[in-house]
Image: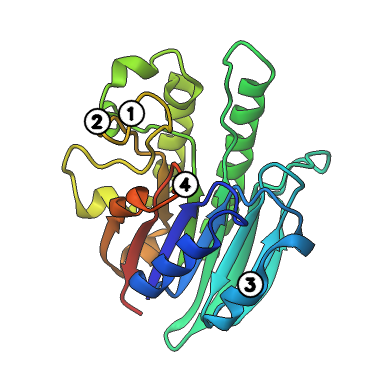
């Protein structure tokens, strides 16, 4: 079973790119972020024609998350618990049933948090605290659970081509990285790092200053696996060539394969 995450940076602009990648990688489940459209405007038809069930939690112009699945989606739940006043569309969760039992998948688009000296950074940290609390509650169910998405977190210096450039950025702040480690401490495994400790593995290249051409990237898109999911991990990877597509997103898909 292949599970993937991809920040498409506006789904309406990337429909053809997304369909091309789906045909190539053939993932069973994909979590998409930064849809930038409301639910009613999501282009469902081409993805359903490609064999995917679609669940969305959209927002006009900003944010927005979706899950595409070749298997039926059950118990679809938008919104991250913990703050009923939070209107930003950044989380969606669903269950898929397989021959080996149910797999729970949470798709997330974690706040960027910049500039650090504004209210955006405390919002990011508070959102991460809510994610950790939710992950702890789900962890108690002792089921395969994957938290897949754009975390806007550079976990380690080796996850950036030039880590010194990110010292003042919300993605690399000690408080941000500490919370990512707290999630790992609950028993969640970084799927890619469990399979490949190589340097130079990035999932995002800025549109500016020739970042893609110079491979000046960062790794901020992650699949974090509960112990029951990690026990089934076969391999993981980054489809970096997708950044070379025409009119690409600044992110590329990250995926893992589970033996179910």
Q: Is residue 188 visible?
A: no
Q: CA distance from mark 4 to mark 1?
A: 14 Å
Q: Which residue is mark 4?
A: 249
- Which of these two is toward me, 79 or 15? 15
The reply to whether callout 4 and callout 2 are in contact (CB within 8 Å) is: no
Q: CA distance from mark 1 to mark 2?
A: 6 Å
Percent of width and height locating residue 229: 39, 65
Percent of width and height locating residue 196: 19, 50
Q: CA distance from mark 1 to mark 3?
A: 35 Å
For discs 4 and 1, the disc positioned in front in the rendered view: 1
Q: CA distance from mark 3 to mark 4?
A: 20 Å
- Which of these two is toward me, 142 or 100? 100
Q: Looking at the image, tell me whether mark 3 or mark 4 is earlier in sequence order.
A: 3
Q: CA distance from mark 3 to mark 2?
A: 36 Å
Residue that appears at 68% across and 62% down: 56
Q: Which residue is mark 2?
A: 214
Q: Which mark identifies residue 129?
A: none
Vertical relation: 68 (above or below) 215: below
For discs 3 and 2, the disc positioned in front in the rendered view: 2
Percent of width and height locating residue 27: 41, 72
Residue that appears at 41% across and 39% down: 220
Q: Which residue is mark 1?
A: 210
Q: Which residue is mark 3?
A: 54
The reply to whether callout 1 and callout 2 are in contact (CB within 8 Å) is: yes
Q: Residues within 10 Å of mark 4 (few under 14, many from 20)?
A: many
The reply to whether callout 1 and callout 3 are in contact (CB within 8 Å) is: no
* 172 sits left or right of 215 in the view: right
Q: Is residue 172 visible?
A: yes
Give the structural element (helix, strand or loop) at label 2: loop
Q: Quadrant of residue 251?
A: top left
């Amino acid at each position: 079973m292949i599970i993937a995450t991809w920040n498409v940076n506006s789904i309406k602009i990337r429909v053809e790119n997304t369909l091309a990648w789906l045909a190539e990688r053939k993932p069973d489940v994909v979590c998409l972020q930064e849809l930038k459209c409301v639910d009613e405007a999501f282009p469902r038809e081409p993805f359903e024609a490609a064999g995917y069930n679609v669940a969305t939690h959209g927002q006009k112009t900003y944010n927005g998350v979706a899950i595409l699945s070749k298997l039926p989606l059950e118990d679809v739940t938008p919104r991250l618990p913990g703050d009923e006043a939070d209107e930003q569309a950044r989380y969606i969760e669903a269950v898929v049933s397989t021959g080996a039992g149910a797999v729970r998948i949470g798709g997330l688009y974690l706040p960027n948090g910049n500039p650090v000296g504004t209210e955006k950074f405390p919002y990011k940290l508070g959102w991460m605290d809510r994610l950790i609390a939710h992950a702890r509650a789900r962890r108690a169910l002792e089921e395969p659970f994957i938290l897949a998405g754009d975390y806007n977190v550079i976990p380690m210096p080796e996850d950036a081509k030039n880590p010194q450039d990110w010292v003042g950025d919300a993605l690399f702040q000690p408080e941000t990285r500490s919370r990512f480690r707290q999630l790992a401490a609950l028993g969640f495994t970084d799927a890619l790092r469990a399979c490949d400790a190589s340097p130079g593995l990035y999932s995002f290249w800025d549109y500016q200053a020739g970042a893609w051409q110079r491979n000046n990237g960062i790794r901020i898109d992650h699949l974090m696996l509960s112990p029951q999911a990690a026990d089934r991990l076969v391999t993981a990877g980054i489809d970096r060539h997708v950044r070379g597509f025409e009119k690409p997103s600044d992110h590329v898909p990250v995926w893992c394969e589970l033996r179910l």
